Amino acid sequence: MPTVRNLSDYIKSRELVETTDPDFQRPLYRKEGFDGIVSFGEIDAKLSAFLLDERAKTGLTQSDFATLAGLARVVYSRYELNISRLTVSRMIHLSELLGFLPMQMIHAAAPHLYGKNPEEADDRVELFRLIHDLPHDTIRSLIGIVGQLTPKDVLEARQKAEAEAEAKAEAERQRLTRKAARVSRKGRPPGRPPGRKSSKVDTPTDD
C-alpha cells in the first residue's frame, strides 16, 4: 500500500503556489508559468487560437471542417471563438483531423510544462516533433543511445547548459553596465571627475 505523503511536502516538491481563479469558488494550487500564473480562461483562449490557426492552414472553411468533425458549423465555431471548452476526447479527435500533436496544442497554451524557460520548452517540443516523424528503426536506435545516458550525464549536461546561460547573462549585464558608463561620461559637464576631492588646501588669512 502506498505510503501516505505529507501534503505540504508534496506542494513544495511540485513547486506549487496557492492562487485563485474566476472559474473556482475555492483557492487552488497551480504551477507558475514564465510570466506568472495563467488563468484557465487565458489557457482556453490560447487553445482556441491554436485550433483556429491549425484549421486555417488546411484551407478548409469552418463549414467543411465541421462536417469532418461531425458537428454543425455553428457548434464547431464555438470552439474557435472560445465559447465552448475543448474536452480531451475532442482534442484527440481534432488532432486526428488536423494532424497536429496534442503536445503541440498544450505547449501553445501552457509552455511552462515543457521547460524552465520559453527556449527550453520550444526546443523540447520541437525535438519530440522531429522524433515523432522518424522511422521506427531510427527511434529504437535513439532509445538505445539515450538509455545509456546516466543520471550523472544528464545532470552534468544540465549544469553545463545553465552555466553557459548564466555566463551569457553576466556578459550582457557587463556590456550594459559599460554602455551606461560611457553614456554617463559623455553627458558629464567639464571639470574634475565626480567624487574626486580637490587637492587645493585653503590657507587661512588674517582679516
Image (spheres, grey):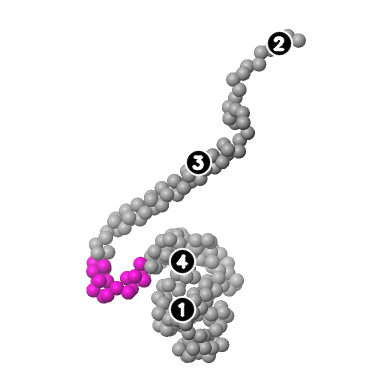
Q: Amino acid at mark 3?
A: Arg
Task: Tell which circle, 3 or 4, labels the residue nearer the N-terminal end.
Answer: 4
Disc 2 crowd, CA 10 A, few/some/many (<14, 14-19, 20+): few
Residue found at x 60% / y 71%? 22
Q: Is 138 within the magenta?
A: yes
Residue position for label 3: 178
Residue 57 appears at what percent x and percent y? 46, 78
Residues under labels 2 and 3: Cα distance?
46 Å
Q: Amino acid at mark 4?
A: Pro
Q: Residue furthest top?
A: 206
Task: Tell which circle, 2 or 3, labels the residue nearer the N-terminal end.
Answer: 3
Task: Tell which circle, 2 or 4, labels the residue nearer the N-terminal end.
Answer: 4
Secondary-structure class at tag 2: loop
Q: Amino acid at mark 1?
A: Lys
159 or 134: nearer the viewer:
134
Q: Are marks 2 and 1 in contact (CB under 8 Å)?
A: no
Against 203, residue 71 (above or below) is: below
Residue position for label 2: 205
Residues under labels 2 and 1: Cα distance?
90 Å
Residue position for label 1: 57
Task: Tell which circle, 4 or 1, labels the residue nearer the N-terminal end.
Answer: 1
